[in-house]
Each structure stands twice: as structure tokens, then as C-alpha cells.
Image (cartoon, coloured by chain):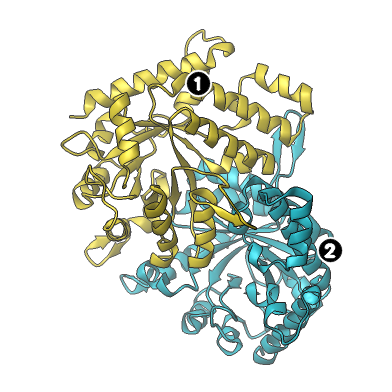
Chain colours: A yellow, B cyan
Amino acid sequence: MGFDRLIKRIQETGNPSVVGLDPKLDYVPSFIKEKHFKENGMTLRAAANAIREFNFALIDALYDMVPAVKPQAAYYEMYGYEGVRVLTETIAYAKSKNMFVITDGKRNDIGATMEAYATAHLGCVSVGTETLEPFGADALTVNGYLGTDGIRPLLRICAEKDKGIFVLVKTSNPSSGELQDRKIGEDTVYDVMGDMCETWGADQIGEFGYSAVGAVVGATYPEQLRELRVRLPHTFFLVPGYGAQGGGAAGVAAAFDQNGLGAIVNSSRGIMCAYQKEMDCPEADFAGAARREAIRMREDLCSHIK
Amino acid sequence: MGFDRLIKRIQETGNPSVVGLDPKLDYVPSFIKEKHFKENGMTLRAAANAIREFNFALIDALYDMVPAVKPQAAYYEMYGYEGVRVLTETIAYAKSKNMFVITDGKRNDIGATMEAYATAHLGCVSVGTETLEPFGADALTVNGYLGTDGIRPLLRICAEKDKGIFVLVKTSNPSSGELQDRKIGEDTVYDVMGDMCETWGADQIGEFGYSAVGAVVGATYPEQLRELRVRLPHTFFLVPGYGAQGGGAAGVAAAFDQNGLGAIVNSSRGIMCAYQKEMDCPEADFAGAARREAIRMREDLCSHIK
């Protein structure tokens, strides 16, 4: 219920971080790419298979100390349906290693169609007399611009299958304020969205006090993080923007409650591409570099959280 | 430039409508499903291939008189990567028949990731020395909640490759007002989003006066349609909600300008499932029923537009 499964993994690993798997082909070491180009030519299939090998090696290097991965759907769609196949395989592999999987898709639509997205990413679909799981993630990021009837189908699946969602509230990008910071009476647009998260989650609060409806709040806006942590006591935060986007651990600490819970912090490129930044790191040690950076990040976060 | 290619197809066919290809398996006639279950069992692959056969037959029946199709990504994702393969094949087939293809994905993310979505759905990706087109649609629906840097990567691809986007402004669902109708000063949230569309499109205005940045405005809110048509003179409208959702042609007429241009009206289930509603229509005539309904819709729309 709520995000209990995720929170327990965070406690077991002592690590409130999630690794974003956003695999541009540029991030994949050349020796992996060359191998797959040899097998399948310079095709979408080869690109996708190279990404699979990269992802699987990262998961192998991280699963015992990182509680969750967050594959970003855009980077898989960029390699067509072969890329989407590898998204499916990455989700399954991470789950087999006991990681909590958040598909970052920011999906949104009206009720009937949102039902299809919910089924696709978190649920099961009927085909004849069979019931099949298309993607099988544990949680999905969504955009609440369409209001309650775009969220309701997700709530049903969260309750039935112990899944979660993260609704965009205050995003980490520079222009997020153009709409999100505008004032609706005394509140901002992101306040209103945050309040809707509290409402949507009210019936599904888990043992740690957090509901199945989380919020995305960027590390790059620490004041808003602090303000929203107080305003949204039952809403678990997914915090992007640490590291590469400029958010630091001191600011991010505001996302956590007095028990050191309530948020998970994402790093994507910082961990996937650690081998490109580490001095004298051979390409072949890309997974080792990712692990070293993940350890550094865990220590950085934990030293700032109560 | 702008939506000129689409507008010319609308003029050639005398038909400002778009058929939504939102293929739940329930919509596919049994004889098609049975055939594919026999070939591949009750699998995601069989479901996807059944949908492909259904879509291709609908396209064959409609391409000479309907200017555009709008596949809804959710219904393909619901059948996993096999479904996404069929989305790709449906886009290619519709384009081969000279239809304008709008992928309804309502994608949104921060700049670097939106770049990946833009590349995936409208652009080309580099793999080694090859340049490949992952999905190849003509236009994509997007959600502007994240502001300008989530839209900018799309604008570049629109300019380079003569593509378009439709930004969610006022959606057709019952709860769209929860956020979209809230007041920011004198304006509503959807007014502010609409104004951003005018700004984003200002450098890419085509020969009919419409930019490459369109807006989604629901048929179920005719007053807002009328108001936005005046407020957003360079923004082409994609109007969902006609038919099954309750929007009528009289209300929808407000989406059009004095030249009878400026909008395209979507019907999905109404056309795809026409064979289930038409009296005594045999399943085998599903494509004929779709065509008859598309003709009825064209006449209904045209009789209400100046």
C-alpha cells in the first residue's frame, strides 16, 4: 500500500536514491556498440540491443545498494519499437533483481485513454482468455493537467496491484515557472496540483504515512521543496535534478521528513556516464564507475538528511 | 510550414475531420481476432497483428476522403512493444496513402528528454553513421505544463522537417476545469497555455495564417472554443470529443474561422465501431460502415461550417 515497498527497499539499502536509466547511444561504451553493430548493422535493433547490454550491466553493478531504477520512456522510444522492447526487458530484469521500477513516461490523457496507459504500464490486459502484463513497472510518472478523470484509472490499479504514481508538481527545468509558478488566488499552480495529489492519494495511505500518489518536485528548487514537504505530508516525492542539473544534496535534504523518509532522489547521467568523468577510467570499467558514483551519491545524501 | 500540408489535404477532401485510431481489441471484429489467435495464440503479438489488420482496412476505406488519422499511443502501448511495432507500421501505411498522421501521445518532459521524444516521434536518430526515422509522424500532441524548454526541441524539428505539434489547452473531459479553468489574474490557466501556443508558433506561420503550434481544444466546451478561436488567431485547433463524448457539430463550428479553416475535428470510436452501431451491419462490412459514418460526419460538419 502507498509506497511501502519502495520505502522498505530504501531502508534496507540505506539509500534514498534512484538511478535514472536514460540511455542515449552516446552514453554506451564504444566496445558494446561495435559488437552490436557487427551483429545487426547500424540499425535501431542494434542500438536497442547495445542499450540492453549497458542497462543490464548497470543493474548488476547497482542492485544490492540502489533501491530503484527509473527508465525514461523517451530514450527507448527514440530507438523505435526495438527500443520499447528493451524498455520492457530492462523493467523485467531490474524487477528480477528486486529493484523497484519507476517508468518515467509523464503519461496523461482523458479517462478512457488513461485507462489504457494505466493498463499498459502498471496493469494487465486481456487478450482472448489470457491476462498479460505489457510493461509491468511498479510506478509511473504522470501529468495531472487534465484533472481527476485522467488520474482515477491509475488509482484503481494502484489499489488493486500495489503500485504507485508520481504526478508532476514542480519540475526541475529552468522554465517550469512559466505556468507552474503563476498565482491562482493565494496559491501557485504547483500548490494546486500538489493539493490534488493529497486528495487523490487520501484512500491509499501506507504504513509510513505516504499515499500511492507521489509528486515530482525538482531538486533545482529547494525552497519550493521545503514548502511542499510541509504542505503535502502524505505525498512521497520523486526528486529529479540532482547533480547534472545542478541540484545539491543540501537543498535536496528539504524533501525529507523528520524520520529521513518521504523522498527519493534521482541521478541519471551522473551515474550512467560516471566512467566518462572519472579520471583514467577505462571504458570497460563503466559499471564499476557507476557503482562508485552511486556510493558517493548515497554518502552525499545521507550526510545531509537527518 | 505551419500546418499547410494538413490544410491542403483538408481542402482537397473537403473534410475537416481526422479519424482517431484508438484500437482496443474489443473494437476489432471477431473474425480478425480469431485468425490471429490461431496464428500466434492469445498473445500480445496476436493482439497487435489483429489491430494492424483492422487499422489497415480502415485506412484503405477512408484515405481518399479523410485527410488525417490520429493513432492514440496509449492503445498501442497497451499491447506492449508488439503494439508499438504496429503503431509504427500504421503510421507508415497511412503516410503511404497520403494521409497526414498525428500521433496522439501528449508527450512532455524537460528539454533534453523532450528532445528525445521529438526525435522519436517526428525526427530522425543517429545510429553510427546511419540516420533512421523511429516513428515518422507528421505531428505530435504534447502537454505544455513544463513551459518553454519542454517545447523548444519540438519547434526546431517542426521548422527543419515541416512538422507540427498540438499543445493541450482545454481538454474535452469532464474534470478538465479542475486546473484548466482556474483563474490566473483575469485569465484562466487554459488562456495562459493558449497564449504560450501563439508565442511558440510565432516564427513558423504558414500560408493560411496558422503556425506549426496547434492547440487541443475539446468539442465538449463550445463556448471556450469560440473564445479561444478569437484569442488565438494563428493557432490551428485539434478538436476531440465530437460524437461519442457528446460534442455536436453546431458547437464545433465555433472552432473554424471565417474561411472555414482553422480546425480539424476528431472522431475515434464513432468511426472505428460504426459497424457495431449500424443496424444489421455484418462484421465483415466494418470498413464500409466506417466509411459511411465518415461521410455522415463530413456532411454534418460541413453543413455547420461557413
Amino acid under disc 1: Asp
Q: Which residue is farthest left?
A: A258
Residue B266 in sight here: yes
Residue B263 in sight here: no
Of all chains, the one bearing label 1 is: A
**Along the line of sight, which residue is nearer the eye, B217 or A265?**
A265
**Along the line of sight, which residue is nearer the eye, A212 or A79?**
A212
Q: Name the residue carrying label 2.
A: B97
> x, y percentage for residue A121?
52, 49
SS label for mark 2: loop
Q: Check the image and report above or below for B167 versus A249.
A: below
- What residue is drawn where x is 62% and y is 56%? A129
Report which quarter residue A257 is drawn in: top left
Residues behind callouts 1 and 2 on a single chain = no
Q: Check the image and report above or below for B209 versus A154.
A: below
Foreground mark, 1 or 2, reads 1
- What residue is drawn where x is 73% and y is 61%? B33
**Disc on res. B232:** none
Q: Name the residue carrying label 1.
A: A60
> x, y percentage for residue B224?
47, 80
> x, y percentage for residue A261?
24, 36
Q: Which residue is farthest top?
A: A280
SS label for mark 1: helix
Amino acid under disc 2: Lys
Of all chains, the one bearing label 2 is: B
